[in-house]
């Protein structure tokens, strides 16, 4: 069981505002749905803490729309449940976001992944004890001493992407974040399908 889920480790500047990017939010929900139904996004009921998050790049810069903090328990989402990350400074550990809800506590890691290259259009972070156990060390795997959601994790993902096959495999195991996996793709469909395919094979 994770203990660090749901805690925002960076300094967050949230500008509350109306929902934007309605069409992108619908697309996010479309691909969130099978992930939620598979239990890869959801809530630890005993702890009341949501897990898993999903995002999509917007435009040609590093802007992205991501599920809001503590939305994991929702069976269905819409534009009210997504936040636009407008700026992210990994070194100073600052994330700026705007929208009806604050960005997921794991927005920093999503930002670090988008910064790896323009080919990455979507990021999915899921939790599964089974997938995590089975793929630890088999898929590209982060250093177990690096905690998720920290600037160190950004550097570690960069290493995996460039040197450990994360770029081609598209899915990585987060050894320092129990039950956590991350999937990337050129599109939301690709990012979601990559992890769903692994899930369906068990
Ligand atoms: Zn997580």
Image: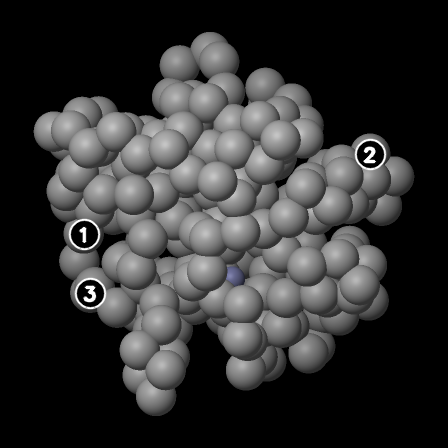
Residue 149: numbered disc: none
Image spot of residue 145 (x, y percent): 80, 63
Identify the residue at horizontal 76%, vertical 39% (top origin).
155
Quadrant (top left/top right/bottom left/bottom right) for the N terminus: bottom right
What secondary structure is found at the residue carrying circle 2?
helix
Disc 2 + disc 3, Cβ < 8 Å: no
Residue 75: numbered disc: 3
Q: Earlier in the sequence, mark 2 or mark 3?
A: 3
Q: Calculate the distance from the C-alpha at mark 1 to the C-alpha at mark 3.
A: 7 Å
Quadrant (top left/top right/bottom left/bottom right) for the C terminus: bottom right
What secondary structure is found at the residue carrying circle 1?
loop
Q: Nearer the viewer, residue 157 or 76?
A: 157
Write down the residue under mark 1. 77
Question: On the rendered structure, is 97 left or right of 111?
Answer: left
Image spot of residue 39 (x, y percent): 38, 73
Mark 1 closeness class: few <14, some 14–19, many ≥20 residues within 10 Å: many
Identify the residue at horizontal 68%, vertical 78% (top origin).
133
Write down the residue under mark 2. 162
Mark 3 closeness class: few <14, some 14–19, many ≥20 residues within 10 Å: few
């Amino acid at each position: 069981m994770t203990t660090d889920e749901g805690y925002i480790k960076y300094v967050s500047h949230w500008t509350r505002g109306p929902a934007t990017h309605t069409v992108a939010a619908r697309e996010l929900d479309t691909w969130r749905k099978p992930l939620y139904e598979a239990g890869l996004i959801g809530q630890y009921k005993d702890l009341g803490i949501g897990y898993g998050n999903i995002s999509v790049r917007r435009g040609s810069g590093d802007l992205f729309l991501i599920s809001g903090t503590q939305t994991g328990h929702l069976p269905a989402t819409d534009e009210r449940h997504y936040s636009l990350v407008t700026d992210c400074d990994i070194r100073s550990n600052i994330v700026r976001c705007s929208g009806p809800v604050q960005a997921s506590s794991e927005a920093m890691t999503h930002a670090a992944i988008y910064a790896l290259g323009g080919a990455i259009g979507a990021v999915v972070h899921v939790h599964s004890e089974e997938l995590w156990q089975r793929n630890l060390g088999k898929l590209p795997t982060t250093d177990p001493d690096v905690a998720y959601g920290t600037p160190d994790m950004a550097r570690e993902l960069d290493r995996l992407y460039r040197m450990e096959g994360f770029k081609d495999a598209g899915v990585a195991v987060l050894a320092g974040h129990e039950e956590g996996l991350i999937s990337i793709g050129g599109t939301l469909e690709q990012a979601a399908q990559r992890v769903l395919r692994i899930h369906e094979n068990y």
